[in-house]
Image (cartoon, rainbow, N blue to C red):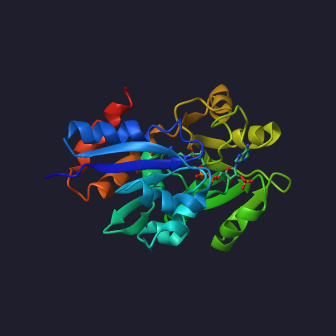
Amino acid sequence: MFTKQLFAIFGDPVSHSRSPLMHNCVFKNLNYPATYTRVHLKDGSKLRETFFKLGLSGANITVPHKEAAFEACDEIRGFAKKIGVVNTIVNENGKLIGYNTDADGFMFAIEEFSDVKNILILGAGGTAKALGARFLQDDVKVDVINRSEGRLSYFKELGCNTFTWDSFKVNKYDLVVNTTSAGLKDEELPAPKNIIDSILDKTSFVADAIYGKLTPFLKLAQEKNIIYKDGADMLLGQGVLANQLFVNSALEKADISTFMKKSFEL
Ligand code: NDP
């Protein structure tokens, strides 16, 4: 007899997340006995306890709990170990195993942007860490600008040029990525407009991790005729990799990708 598995996404906010739709579309169409729901979690330190209380087989973690998710796990595997940021948890016989699929998901998303050698990351949270470390691995030069100083120390240690809004000096970039949550549930830019204007005037490509809306940042890029993309392909890339982990390779990657993509039409 099959026991139906339950998966979830934890976040605050979480109502915007398309992950339930994406994973359920895969499970339903490929007859995999599982359901995926969302959990609005305010206190990241309650993640582990909530996970077990709900009897979950696995979870995704979104803003702002990815670093708390790292702490909640019994074991960390792969790239997540390097960056201390977990966006996917799998329950392996009562042990929580943490992974990060955001970084490779993003690399998949920007495949069409050629010759990226020099990037600026806006923000210094979990997503910024994942992308920063992943780009450095490919010998791309990484600059980071963040609203506050504290989280920049991680990037300083990696050898990145780091700036707050006050100390920022613009450079020429191949790609600028917004990983802040500015524009997610408000209409804010990731930094004051004069800074964003100066950055956009010096870049070839722009990407935003936020999906499902044209953020004020992307709107400005559009007005300046810069080639841009939102976070939808990153969402797809990280989702396919997370689903493979959830089903422990019981489904084909190509099939997962097909039905996850289909969910974007719903
Ligand atoms: P974190 O909470 O870890 O980091 C948020 C970052 O945004 C911090 O650097 C913070 O600065 C900055 N920030 C927050 N609000 C503002 C603001 N109003 N103005 C300027 N900076 C701000 O979040 P995550 O890294 O987990 O996620 C960031 C974004 O990326 C979210 O919008 C999330 O939805 C999106 N995302 C999308 C994915 C996809 O698949 N498309 C995957 C992963 C994330 P400070 O340090 O000063 O607080």
- Total numbered labels: 0
Please provide percent x and percent y for residue 148.
78, 56
The quadrant of the picture occupied by the C terminus is top left
From this viewpoint, which residue is outermost toward the right? Answer: 166
Q: Is residue 35 left or right of residue 154?
A: left
Q: Residue at x 41, y 69 (%)?
A: 78
Please provide percent x and percent y for residue 2.
17, 51
From this viewpoint, which residue is outermost toward the front? Answer: 53
Please provide percent x and percent y for residue 92.
32, 67
From this viewpoint, which residue is outermost toward the left? Answer: 1
Q: Is residue 175 left or right of residue 197?
A: left
208 in relation to 71, above or below: above
Please provide percent x and percent y for residue 222.
62, 28
Q: Residue at x 37, y 61 (%)?
A: 90
213 in relation to 55, above or below: above
Q: Residue at x 70, y 43 (%)?
A: 202
Examine the image and state in which quarter residue 193 appears: top right
| Relative depth, front residue between 4 and 125 | 4
Residue 140 in sight here = no
Q: Is residue 99 left or right of residue 182?
A: left
Residue 237 in sight here = yes
| Relative depth, front residue between 49 and 127 | 49
197 in relation to 61, above or below: above
